[in-house]
Amino acid sequence: PIVSIMSTPSEAVNGTIAYLTICFIGIPFITAYNIISSILRGMGDSKSPMYFIAVACVMNIILDYIFMGALHLGPAGAALGTTLSQTVSVAAALIFLMKKEHGLSLHRADFKPQSPIMGRILKIGVPIAMQDGLIQVAFILITIIANQRGLTDAAAVGIVEKIISFLFLIPSSMLSTVSALGAQNIGANQPERAKQTLRYAIYLAAGFGIVISILVQFVAEPVVSLFTSDNDAILAGGQYLRGYIWDCFFAGIHFSFSGYFCAC
């Protein structure tokens, strides 16, 4: 039913179903990794989550070569590689959290639900989830429209979304940085330092957005061609990327403010 609602081209239906099924199984591992990484970032350690995800990325690439290359599993192989690599990153992060001297200890009793703590988490988490959810609903609608226009446009949009996801690492990192550092400074009764964090994050994110947006105007088609040899998809993807890339500038500013408000 999900694939049907998304107006997935008939050529891609079976692969999409397999990919989604396996990826949904991996959602608990994504959630666990994000929770552990947030705890570490909140304690001022942003390097360890980077190491964990780096290991997962390398493993993901290797598994993709095995599952999609040697075993010819197609989209299901890609999803399986992603899910297994995420599982490894969660296991590594959990072991690190329990072994490292962070001043934290983890016991079985800690997994017992406590209403006051869960309420505090949900009070902040639900609005954030709604914010991200609304953005994703918009992207789903865009994907549906692209899928209805045929395989070429669907492929072009899918490729550009992957490119944008990579480039959005900078704006997204500003959100996490401002959120963690801002919360620490506000908690230490240093609101001016939290505002400084916001200001410099905006400078960095907006500067990156301007530079990358101008650069992409000259290299859009070559970048898209890294993912496909279809000339029609390259042309459509280049057009889409040239317009879409400017969102790096606006999203950088928006994400920085979102991080600051979450910190508050």
Image (spheres, rainbow, N blue to C red):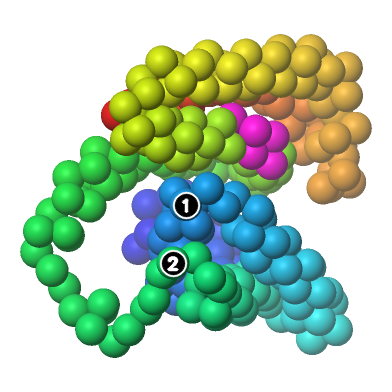
- The amino acid sitting under disc 2 is Gly
Q: Which percent across, then down, holds residue 54?
A: 72, 61
Closer to us: 228 or 52: 52
Residue 4 colored magenta? no
Of helix, strand and loop, which one carries label 2? loop
| 125 on left or right of 247 | left
**Is 183 rendered above or below residue 258?**
below
For the C terminus, the image quarter is top left
Can residue 136 be seen in this snapshot?
yes
Q: Position of residue 229 (x, y in %)?
A: 89, 46
Q: Which residues are magenta?
A: 166-171
Depicted 140 relative to depicted 189: above or below: below
**Mark 1 → mark 2, Cα distance in angstroms:** 10 Å
Q: Nearer the viewer's eye, disc 1 or disc 2?
A: 2
Residue 167 on image: x %, y %: 69, 34
Q: Is residue 253 visible?
A: no
Q: Are marks 1 and 2 in contact (CB under 8 Å)?
A: yes
Judging depth in this view, the residue of 96 and 49 nearest the camera is 96
Above or below, 168 against 91 in this view is above
Task: Kindly identify the residue that appears in the image at 88 percent across and 24 percent down.
Answer: 219
Q: In the shown orientation, is residue 27 left or right of residue 109?
A: right
Q: Main secondary structure of the magenta part?
A: helix
Instruction: Look at mark 2 in the image and give the residue it sits on.
Output: 103
Side (left or right) of 126 relative to 40: left
